[in-house]
Image (cartoon, rainbow, N blue to C red):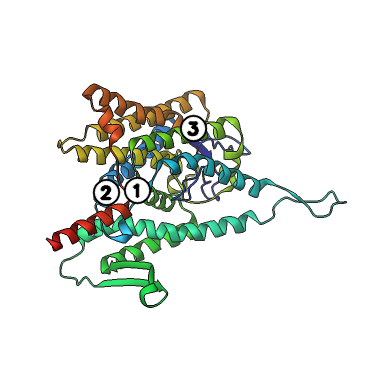
Amino acid sequence: MSEVEQAPASAPQAAAALLDALNTTDSNGTDAVNATAKFVATPEGTALAYGSLVLMALVPIFFGALRSVACSKSKNASDMPETITSRDAARFPIVASCTLFGLYLFFKVTFLLDPHSQQHVTEVFSQEYINLLLSVYFFMLGVLALSHTMSPLLSRIFPASLPIKQYQLLFTQGTGEAKEDIINYEFDTNNLVCLLASSVVGVWYLLKKHWIANNLFGLAFALNGVELLHLNNVSTGCILLGGLFVYDVFWVFGTNVMVTVAKSFEAPIKLVFPQDLLEKGMDASNFAMLGLGDIVIPGIFIALLLRFDVSLKKNSRTYFYSSFLAYIFGLGLTIFVMHTFKHAQPALLYLVPACVGFPVVVALFKGELTEMFRYEESSAEEALVKGDSSESAKKDQ
């Protein structure tokens, strides 16, 4: 989590650390300073900015976790979650580190034009072109993510008098018995309306890079990540959070790699809020920001604990609420330390111990620690096969 200053005419700077399914970058460790004079935020502006960031972080975790419960039971191919195994969790920090360092080299390595010349090409590709390609890429991802986020809400307020037509986008490979589906997407009129509204936001972001459009895409990415990325058990969650804890601390405190990539990489993969909003209104340019990795990584663990609560069938959400409160505590501690020492902090340094420690203590107190670590979720494909097998068995009977 960090503070970022920008000139009034520039777009918000992105943050750096990788989230595989979201192609995101974690913003920890970024602290850009204006070349002329450092803006000093008022206490009111700082409180408003950080309070808004905390609130925006909690929304996708809370609602994404609730939606993950329904998602785990869905048989719709477009809503099926991606299950993260212990092997995936162990490899993820390594893959993320390689990708982050690759981006660093991509932006910083120089090449000799001539072996006998002292001239250098400081950019193999223009940074403007790179960020343009990234903007188009995240425009498409953002439109789809925002549309998926809005769809359940719009379906409730969609007038019943309007006809809802069903559509199917089908793309197959091969013929006859060898035919297999490459794309099989079912949608309706409601989804088309959501797609149109999301496209308007996408064009706004693409043309203006406005911080509100950035946040709409960022919230959609975070909510979809918490909803659709499922850990298969608590041990896997501990492996993932522990690995990314080390990753975050190393790349923020040990090197300048994350800072360099954060200053060069432009994409809606962070939440931002201006600290000078009270002074400059919508033209504010001094942003505090929080990377989506600091939301989604703890969020998928919190969502797992909610599904564990549901599996207990005790009509309580003890582990969900304890981990949710732990996240609030950890994020608040991050802000406090950063504000006290005036230095950007890796949020996972505080979030991981809180989000893992609180539920473990609760489980020890309730005598359910073994049960919590034994809880296992099958992948979407395995659940679908089991469901089809049970239905076939019922028909045979």
Q: Earlier in the sequence, mark 2 or mark 3?
A: 2
Q: Are marks 2 and 1 in contact (CB under 8 Å)?
A: yes
Q: Of helix, strand and loop, which one carries label 1?
A: helix
Identity, as a three-letter code, of the amino acid under mark 2: Arg
Q: Of helix, strand and loop, which one carries label 2?
A: helix
Identity, as a three-letter code, of the amino acid under mark 3: Pro
Query: Quick check: can you spot residue 23?
Result: yes
Residue 185 image point, x, y percent: 33, 66
**In the rendered view, does 124 fall on the left or right side of 333?**
right
Return the residue nearer the eye: 247 or 188: 247
Q: Of helix, strand and loop, which one carries label 3?
A: loop
Residue labelled with disc 3: 346
**In the rendered view, does 9 fall on the left or right side of 110?**
left
Residue labelled with disc 2: 67
Identity, as a three-letter code, of the amino acid under mark 1: Leu
Q: Earlier in the sequence, mark 3 or mark 1?
A: 1
Q: Residues within 10 Å of mark 1 (few under 14, many from 20)?
A: many
Q: Are marks 3 and 1 in contact (CB under 8 Å)?
A: no
x 39%, y 40%: residue: 295
Residue 239 image point, x, y percent: 42, 35
x 54%, y 37%: residue: 30
* Alpha-carbon span between mark 2 and mark 1: 9 Å
Residue 153 image point, x, y percent: 25, 56
**In the rendered view, does 98 fall on the left or right side of 109?**
left
Q: Is residue 160 above or below residue 372?
A: below
x 22%, y 60%: residue: 155
- Where, by quadrant of the figure, is residue 237 drawn? top left
